[in-house]
Image (cartoon, rainbow, N blue to C red):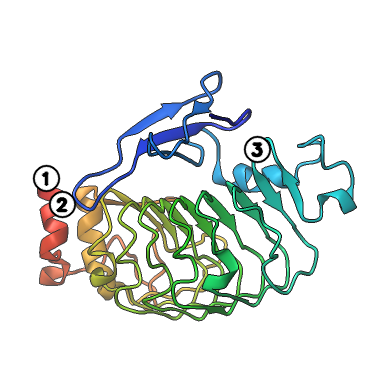
Amino acid sequence: MYVWETETLVVYQAPTRQSQPLFQPFCPGEMQAATTSNERQMMTLPACISVVLLLLVPLLPGGDAGCTNQQSCKNHYDTARRRFWNNFWGLSEIPSSIPSDALWVELMGNEISSVDHEDFVGLQSLIYLGLSINQISSVGDGAFSDLRSLLMLSLMSNKLTSVHSRMFTELHYLQQIMLSSNEISEIEEGSFDDLFSLQKMLLHNNKLATLSADLFINLPRPLELSLSDPDGDTNVWNCSSLCWLKQEMQHGTVTWWFDYSPKCADGGSFKSQQCGDKGQIKHSIQHQMDL
C-alpha cells in the first residue's frame, strides 16, 4: 500500500488496445492507492492540481524532512514517497543510483545530452520521469521501453530536432507527454503508435510547420493538444495541413490543452481556414468518433 500525502491520485485498471482506462479519482482525504502486481493498479498524476505545480513539488523548500540543505538534496531519495531528484547539478548523464523501486524521478535543469535504454533498465515502477531543461539532442531506440508503468514524461526545453519512430515504444500506459520548447521540425510516421493511453501532448515552441493525421491515428480520443504559445510560438503552421485537426475539434475528439489556436504561416486564422474535402478524417479516427 502506498500513500501520497499531498497530491491527488487517480487509480485505473491497465488499459488494452480494445478498452479505455477505467478511472476512479481520489481527492484529498482519500489518498490511498493499491500498487501490488496482483491488483494491477497504478497511480497517475494529479487530476486536481496543475501540472506546473506538480513539476515544482520536489523543488519546494521544506517539502521533505530528509532534504535539509543543498548537499543532502543531491541524489536525494525520499523513501516514504519513493521520489528521487537531482536538479540543477550539472549532470551530464542519467545517474546510475536511481533506486529500482522509484515512482518519481526528477532530473530537470542539468546538462544531460542523450538518453538510452540502458539508463532506465529495471525502473519498472516509475510513473513520472522529468528531464526538462537539459541539453538532450539524442534519444536512443526504445530508450524508455523498460518504463512499463510510466504515466507522465517531460522532455520540455531540450535540443531535440526530430522525433523518430522508435523513441516512445512500449509506453502503453503513458498519459501525458511534454515535447514543447525543443527544436523539433520533423516527427516520423509511427512515432506515437504505442501510446495507447495518451490524453495530453505538448508540441508548442518547436519548428513544426505540418502535422499529419497519420501520426495520431492510433491515439485514443478525446485528446488534448498544445500547438501554440500565445507569448510567441516558434511553430509557424501551414494551416491547410491541419484541416483534419479542425474537423476533429468540431467533433470534440481533439481539444486545445491551453486553448490557443495555431499560428498560420500566411497570417490567417486557423479557425477561418477553408478546408473543403481536405478535412476528411482517417477511417480509424472516424470509427472512434462513432463509438
Q: Is residue 267 left or right of residue 74?
A: left
Q: Nearer the viewer, residue 135 or 15?
A: 15
Q: Image point 73% across, 74% down: which residue?
A: 92
Residue 121, labelled with which disc?
A: none
Q: Badge 2, how many Cα within 10 Å: few under 14, some, many 20+?
A: some
Residue 68 percent coordinates (x, y): 88, 41
Residue 288's disc is 2
User: x, y percentage for residue 170?
Assistant: 37, 63
Residue position marked by numbered label 3 in the rendering:
81
As measured in the structure, the alpha-carbon distance from the residue carrying label 3 to the one carrying label 2 is: 38 Å
Closer to the camera, 189 or 114? 114
Q: Nearer the viewer, residue 286 or 14?
A: 14
Crowding near the residue tagged with mark 1, few <14, some 14–19, many ≥20 C-alpha atoms within 10 Å: few
CB atoms of marks 1 and 2 within 8 Å: yes
In the rendered view, does 262 fall on the left or right side of 218?
Answer: right
**Label drawn at residue 291:** 1
| Residue 283: quadrant of the picture | bottom left
Q: Amino acid at mark 3?
A: Arg
Vertical order, 5 against 243 (above or below):
above
